Structures are given as structure tokens and as C-alpha cells.
Amino acid sequence: MMTVPTNRGWLLSGVRAIRVLLLLLVLALWETVASFGGSLRSYVPHVWDLAAALGRVLGEEEFGAHVQATLIALGSGVAIGGVAGILVGLAITSVRSVRFVLEPVVLYLGAIPKIVLYPLFIYTLSVGMASKVGMASLSVFFPVAVSTVGSAWLVRPVWLRAATVLDAGRWQAVRHVALPAMLPSILTGVQLGVAAGIVGTVAAESKVGKEGIGHMVIDYYSRLELPEMYVLVLLVFVCASVLAIGMNRVLKGLRKAEERQSNQPLLL
Amino acid sequence: METRDLTVAVTNPDAPGPPPGGRPRRERRRASLDRLAPWLRALLIVGVVGLLELVVGLGLINPLFVPKPSDALAELVGDAGEYARLLGTTLYETAVAFLGAAVIGSGLGYLLWRHRVLAAAVEPVLVGLFASPIILLYPIFLIVLDRSVTAVIVQAMIGGIIPTVVTTQRALHGVRATYLRAGYLYCRNRRQSFVNVLLPAAMPGIVSGLRLGLTYTLLTVLATEYLTNIGGIGAEISGAYTLLRTDRMYAALILVLVLTSAFLYGLDRLERAFHAKGGQG
């Protein structure tokens, strides 16, 4: 049976076509520079060299151990920094005068590039996994804390007054009114925190240390194994992108579910 | 935006509704809190610094790892010329990188706004790049551009482009359809409509995007300087750490804190002024 393409159908096919075209364009440009790029040729390996390098990188004996080291540092950082960020954010939010005083302090401290504070972790926790976890935790902490503190703006006073009128207790008002309203912003903070955690972890690994993906990239750079270095950077980007897109979809789904719920008629 | 009253209601949910005349009292309390907050904040910072001075002075923290804040400040003041030079280098790198990021980012943002299908096609790429550790590209720039300030500038420019693209596109999308129709009806051509209608309408959003781009550019400059040991304050932190000159390292860290805070504060004020002007217009 023939189907008539809808507007959405056309859009989707157009999007797919453009994606393929863009990918081909990038590959063609890369290959042009690799073949005829003059002095740049020595820095831009052929696509087939990159493909071969991918095999070598993935086949390297210690590749798994490096990935594991990065994931452990990142996972621990997300857990410690995320929980600490939410708890500190909620503590600041729960007392009005404290929030007035501390909100700008958290905001301004959060704007510092965390990697420049890495020497402090090395001094206190020495070179190794502990200092990397510290770095990742700090990187995750600030976006989560800032979003949690900012999420208080999303709780409308009228909702809390309604809860009071309905005879809700203090904990009930927090659990059923304040927290659900704050949740999307907190989750966005966690998403930003994970991205910041990846940056903090790999940047720390690239500066000091003997394990992790960041260290591998710098190791390839110092040995001038450029195809391997490019491939590894690309792999990190792809993994971070997939994670970000996945989290984005989950957040969108949560928001839609919340909208559906809030649009339901109130039955009295 | 409605005023927040989370704490009052949550801490005392059984309290009766606002009595007649209660609102002005609450607003008065809030105004006095607004006035007091900066002083309390300053007191908190002075307290923390004083406590650190005391703890290090008593030998509870090894001064080899954490110097007295007064020593770090004395270092900063004593070698003010050198720190001013480092600050100048960082600011120069930030300015050049931001200029590139603003031009390229705004241009790409406009292009994506004009072509809906293209925007839909590259959206996942932008989301992915926004979350990717762009900083990891620095070895590539070191190879191609050598160990130079240019490498730091290009790395920072890439760091600033992506947020600028995303926010410019969003700002243009946020322009009301009524304005676009008015531009179509009353302007002679697309260029006129863009300059006289679209651009002024989207400007507050574009300015917010540029503010974000500038912040990202500065952060990337400092991070790249630290990682590569090239350039201004970031490189100084790395060098001082290697030489175990903690007084110099902390002096540079104080400078980073002051610089990022001043940037954030200045940009915030500028954006508010711009929005206020736009609101009056």
C-alpha cells in the first residue's frame, strides 16, 4: 500500500540525508587535507590510517585497564559530588537567610575552572586515583549545587500555600510539593555535572598520573602517534555525546510525563 | 517572576495565611535581608580567611602545602608587575578567542535558525559537543600550532563557539512570529527585516549567549594555560606547583578567583543594564 509522506516524514528523511551529507563532507575535507594539505599533511593522517589506529588502540593490552580507571574516577566523582551537591543545595535552600548569603558565593566559586585547583588535590591526596576522584567530585559538585539552589525559584509560593490550606505537614509539603517542582532543575544539574565530571577527570589524567584515558591521549601525543591520539579523542567525544544525548532523552521524557500529570483534571 | 517564599511556608506550614498588612512586613524583612546579605557574605569570607591564617599559623596545616593567606597576598602585592603581565596575557587570549567565538558562533547560530532541517540534523552533534571534554583537543592544537599562545587561543575559541551557537539559535527562535510578520510586511527586503526587526528583538537572548560564550572562553583559556604551561595565570599555577612555590601558586589562584568573579559580576551587571534598556525601549 502506498503511503503519503507527511511533513514530519519529509523532515526526518531530510535530516537523515543532511547528516549523511555532512559526514561525507567532513570525511572528504579531511582526506583532501591529508592528501594535498601541504605542511598540514604531516598532522592529518589518512582515514584508512585512522581506521587501522582504531584497531590498534582497542587491541592494546592496557586499554581496558585505562578505561576502567577513568570510569571508576568518574563514577565515584558523580556519586560523591552529586550527592554532596544536592545535600548542600537543599541545605542552602531550606533557610531563607542562608540562601541569600550563600547563593552568590556558590555561584561565583562554581565559575572557577576546577582543573586549576588540581594541585590542591595532589598535595592533599597525592597523585593517583584519590586525587582524580577528588577532582571529579569537585567538578560535579558545583553544577549540581548551583542547579539545586536555583531550583527553589521553581517552587511557586501559591503551591506551598495550597499545601498549607490542605493541612499538609512540613515534610509532606517538602516531599509532595517542593521536591517534585525542583526535580527537573536538579536533574539538569546532574546532567551538567556528569559532563563537567568527564572534563575534570580526563583533564586531570592528562596533566598528572599514569592511568586513564586522558593519560593515554597525552602518552600518544608525547610519542607522536597521531592517528592513535585522534582516534582516542574521537572515541571519548562519541562516548560523552552518547551519554549526553541519552540523558537528554531521559530528562525530556520525565518533563513530558510531568506535564501530562499536571494537565490532568483535579478530581475533588 | 513570583517571589519565593519556600522557607517561610515549609518551615511553618501550619501558620495561618498572611494577615492584612502582613505582606508589607514580609517585604520589609526581605529588603533588610537584601541590605545585610553582602555584609554577611563579606564577614563569612573574612572569617574563613582568618581561620585559615590561624590554622596554618598554629602549624595544624603544613605551610609547604597551604601557605598563610597573608603570605600569598604579600607575594601577589610584592610581584604585582609580573602578575599584571600574566593577567594581561590571559585577558589578551580571552579577548581574541572570544572575538572569534562570537563571530563564528553567532553566524552559525543564525545559519541553523534559517535552516530548520540543518538545525535538526546537527542538534545531536551540538548536544554531544556541549557535553564532550573539548579541553582534550589541546594536544592536537599543540601539534598543529606549536607550543604557542595561538594554540591556547584556538582551543579557547572552540570552547566558546558551541555555547554561542546554541544560545544564538535559541534567541532567534524565541522572536515572536508577530514581529517576523511585521518585518515581512513593512520592510523592503530580508536584510532590512533582519537589521530592523529580527536583530533588535533577539538581542537580549543573543547578549545572554555572548555572556555565556565569554565565560566559557575565559574558563577554557585558564584551563588550557594550566594544562599546557603556556600563557598567563593558568601557566603560572602549573609552574609554581612544579617548583613547589605554594605562595606563588596560591597568589595566582587568588588572581583566578578575583578574575572569574569580576568577569561574572561585570557581565551580569552589563546584561541587566542591557535588559533594562531593552525593557524601556
Image (tube, grey):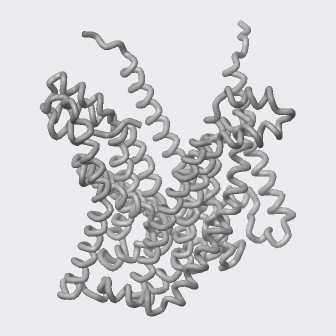
Q: Residue furthest top?
A: A1
Residue B105: x, y in percent?
A: 68, 52
The image quarter in which residue A174 lies: top left
Of residue B265 and residue B73, the one placed in the foreground of this image is B265
Q: Is residue A246 above or below residue A65?
A: above
In the rendered image, the vertical position of residue A126 relative to residue A182, given as above or below: below
The residue drawn where x is 65% and y is 79% is: B147
- Toward the bottom, the furthest residue is B78
Work out whether A204 lies above or below A81: below
Is residue B114 toward the left or the right of residue A185 in the image? right
* Residue visible at 48% across and 60% down in the picture: A199
Q: Where does the image place residue B124, in percent across and percent down from the top left? A: 60, 41
> As rendered, which of B275 and B106 lies closer to the eye?
B275
Quarter in which the N terminus of chain A is drawn: top right
Q: In terms of image quadrants, where is residue A57?
A: bottom right
Quarter of the rendering occupied by the C terminus of chain A: top left
Residue that appears at 47% across and 33% down: A252
Residue B48 vs residue B272: left or right? left
A29 over A135 or under it: above or below: above
Residue A79 in view: no
Q: In this view of the protein, can residue B25 be seen by the observer?
A: yes
Q: Residue at x 35, y 73 (%)?
A: A121
Instruction: List the single residue furthest toward the front.
Output: B21
Q: Looking at the image, how many numbered discs can be counted on the residues?
A: 0
User: Where, by quadrant of the figure, is residue B145 drawn?
Assistant: bottom right
Spot occupied by residue B116 in the image (x, y as percentages of width and height): 70, 33
Viewer-nearest residue: B280 or B204: B280
| Side of A252 relative to B71 (left or right) | right
